[in-house]
Amino acid sequence: MNTPLAQVIPERLQNLDSLHQRFSTPVPGILYDILLVLSLLTLVLAVVSLLGRVQRRYRTRELLPQPIVVFRRVSAGMGLSWLDRFWLWRLAVVTGCAHPTVLLISAVHFDAALTSYASRSGLLAARALALPRLEAVRGRLFGGSDLPPSPVAGPAR
């Protein structure tokens, strides 16, 4: 097992010479390979950056107040039926109410929106179906005793 030192040195020199030859000869496609790797890294970084921006935009959009989501949650929490919620949402959309939840909170805004809705032209049959339903919703939301009657409601019998 013991090899003489004189035999080890020439083998080592031969290995070092072969390594030197391997690294001293130019590789024709090395520059192309380096550019390819750098461009792939740049592409990966660009995709990651783009995904980060999209995710940040999505998160900030979730944090912005969304009036229709608040309206749906509050109206469902008040125990309104899905049909009543639909007509209230429709009332808010037709009258251009920016925050439909205000119709659930303020009788004054509700009455103003109802008056505006009743005075518009369009599908009169749909309005004729909606107005009594909206009057009933108004009564459930605000109670009828301490509020003046809605301007849309007919004369009391």
Image (spheres, grey):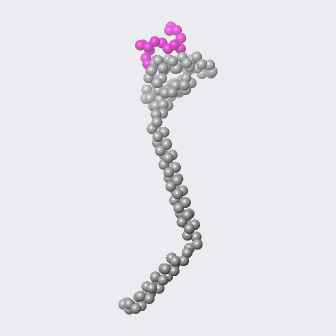
Location of the N terminus by quadrant is: bottom left
The residue closer to the viewer here, 91 or 15, is: 15
Check residue 148 for magenta coloring.
yes
Q: Position of residue 35 (x, y in %)?
A: 55, 64
Residue at the limit of the structure toward the top, as seen here: 157
Residue extending furthest toward the right: 122
Range of residues picked out in magenta: 137-157
Our reading of the magenta stretch's main secondary structure is loop
The answer to whether one can see residue 96 in this image is yes
155 relative to 35, above or below: above
Q: Return the x and y of residue 63 as percentages of the image width and height.
A: 45, 38
Is 87 a magenta residue?
no
Residue at x 49%, y 43% (from the top left corner): 57
Q: Is residue 136 visible?
A: no
Residue 152 percent location from the top left of the image? 53, 14
In percent of the image, x 51 and y 59: which residue is there?
Answer: 41
**Residue in the picture at 48% in, 79% down:** 19
